[in-house]
Image (spheres, rainbow, N blue to C red):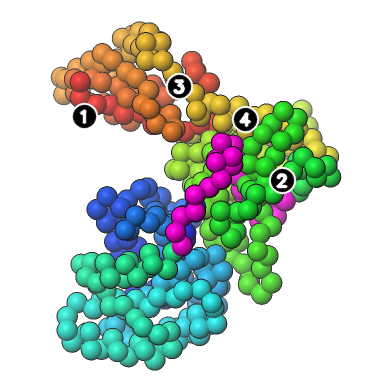
């Protein structure tokens, strides 16, 4: 599993610039998701053959100094708790500020690797000025210039040495699909997992987690066999005041990245909130299958239209990716939990299905001929051939004479037609147009 590297520090020291530098370095970009939450960034990077996730913790820029310091402290504490390596970014132009000293005080208490990166060092004079940062009491520092990239190579060389080598997973475990139960705190994830596992412990075998905060449980019951990844009750926080949105997204990152299906649990009594959307779009951007479980449905006052209206509101928030199974469940009464498992298995099968090229052309080419892409500037696009790519997730390519004239609405049209014909429920798909 990927390690998490958190960039912490007060605002305006260049964290976002440095973050962009990390995830956009040459072919190192695996994928990047902007705005996992309202004001934070999450992305993947690779250096010297090691992959890692990078989280820019951002900073608050409103409120009085006291409130400001309290919010910064909370975010830094959460980053310290969840990350494997912490990069503490400071600004050579302003030297050590009281806020820097406060963050350093927190970082001196942790046992995890902390790297001090002195930003905006772009000449020899500033190299000398950076000596001041020894006073933070965090040991050696690295001088970088996030804008130009100077010094970032040395920092990354040292960073990847701190990351553990990837451990080859057990071959038996790798054969099983991985279903991650994700969602915001207090949505009922633990209750659902406990209800699924039940008291018949003989059917459950614990597999050592590939990272310290991910626990896989081999689930074999009612004809289903897969690894159930619990992100619910791992590493309870005793002293950290939780910024719930940031915390739940950070906790979900690893589980989502290395799962096949994400079972997103939402609280029926609270509705589909922004935090749920953040986790949903994180799963969608990583091209994972998604099943939404509306938990605590037994606590909601219902009439004959409740389910339909509730589901419609959720799908409105999910646009344009609305082809997602939504089930109304209760962990307490165990209502529809087995149906939820059946649906998750169906989505897994949908995600790995392969459509024969001949059948795909027989189906799609008549649709395209009846409704071709609209002409643009007098240019007519002719699509003559299409196929599914041999990738882990469903990707389709259409070969045509002028792919640059095919716009997003027509891609959406083809996707909708494909979803009508083929069972792709819960599965994000990619459509490409290429020169014939």
Question: As rendered, which of 79 and 307 lies closer to the eye?
Answer: 79
For disc 3, the marked residue is: 354
Q: CA distance from mark 3 to mark 2?
A: 32 Å
Binning the other alpha carbons within 10 Å of mark 2 as few (below 14), some (14 to 19) or many (20 upward) gives few
Q: Reading the chain from its start, which is encountered first: label 2 or label 1?
A: 2
Q: Is residue 182 above or below residue 352?
A: below
Please report the residue visible at 67 percent of the width from the left and 39 percent of the height from the top.
293
Please report the residue visible at 23 percent of the width from the left and 89 percent of the height from the top.
128
Q: Is residue 214 above or below residue 227?
A: below
- Does dot 3 land on a helix, a strand or a loop? loop
Residue 340: horizontal and vertical position, in percent?
A: 69, 33
Q: CA distance from mark 4 to mark 1?
A: 37 Å
For disc 4, the marked residue is: 345
Q: CA distance from mark 2 to mark 1?
A: 52 Å
For disc 1, the marked residue is: 404
Q: Are marks 3 and 1 in contact (CB under 8 Å)?
A: no
For disc 2, the marked residue is: 205
Q: CA distance from mark 4 to mark 3?
A: 16 Å
Assign the C terminus to one quadrant of the image. Answer: top left
Q: Is residue 132 above or below residue 309?
A: below
Which residues are the magenta region? 164-190
Residue 26 among magenta residues:
no
């Amino acid at each position: 599993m990927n390690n998490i590297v958190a960039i912490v520090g007060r605002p305006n020291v260049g964290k976002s610039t440095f973050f962009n530098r990390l995830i956009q370095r040459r072919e190192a970009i695996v994928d990047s998701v902007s705005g996992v939450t309202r004001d934070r960034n999450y992305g993947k990077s690779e250096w010297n053959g090691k992959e890692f996730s990078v989280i820019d913790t951002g900073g608050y820029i409103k409120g009085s100094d006291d409130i400001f310091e309290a919010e910064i402290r909370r975010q830094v504490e959460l980053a310290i708790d969840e990350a494997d390596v912490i990069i503490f970014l400071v600004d050579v132009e302003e030297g050590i500020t009281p806020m820097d000293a406060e963050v350093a005080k927190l970082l001196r208490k942790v046992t995890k690797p902390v790297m001090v990166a002195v930003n905006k060092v772009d000449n020899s004079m500033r190299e000398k000025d950076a000596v001041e940062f020894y006073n933070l009491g965090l040991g050696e520092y690295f001088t970088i210039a996030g804008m130009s990239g100077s010094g970032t190579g040395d920092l990354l060389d040292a960073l990847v040495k701190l990351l553990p080598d990837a451990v080859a997973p057990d071959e038996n475990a790798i054969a099983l699909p991985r279903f991650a139960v994700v969602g915001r705190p207090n949505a009922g994830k633990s209750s659902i997992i406990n209800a699924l596992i039940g008291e018949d412990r003989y059917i459950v075998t614990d597999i050592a987690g590939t990272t310290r905060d991910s626990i896989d449980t081999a689930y074999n019951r009612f004809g289903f066999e897969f690894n159930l990844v619990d992100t619910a009750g791992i590493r309870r926080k005793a002293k950290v005041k939780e910024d719930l949105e940031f915390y739940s997204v950070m906790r979900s990152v690893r589980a989502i990245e290395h799962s096949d299906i994400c079972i997103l649990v939402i609280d029926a009594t609270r509705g589909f909130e922004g935090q749920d959307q953040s986790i949903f779009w994180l799963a969608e951007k990583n091209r994972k299958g998604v099943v939404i479980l509306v938990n605590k449905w037994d606590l909601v006052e219902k009439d004959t239209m409740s389910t339909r209206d509730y589901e419609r509101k959720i799908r409105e928030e999910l646009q344009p990716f609305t082809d997602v199974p939504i089930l109304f469940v209760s962990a307490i009464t165990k209502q529809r939990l087995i149906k939820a498992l059946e649906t998750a298995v169906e989505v897994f099968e949908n995600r790995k299905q392969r459509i024969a090229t001949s059948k795909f052309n027989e189906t799609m080419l008549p649709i395209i001929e009846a409704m071709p892409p609209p002409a643009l500037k007098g240019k007519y696009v002719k699509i003559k051939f299409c196929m599914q790519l041999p990738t882990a997730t469903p990707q389709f390519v259409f070969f045509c004479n002028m792919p640059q004239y095919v716009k997003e609405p027509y891609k959406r049209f083809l996707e909708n037609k494909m979803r009508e014909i083929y069972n792709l429920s819960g599965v994000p798909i990619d459509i490409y147009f290429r020169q014939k």
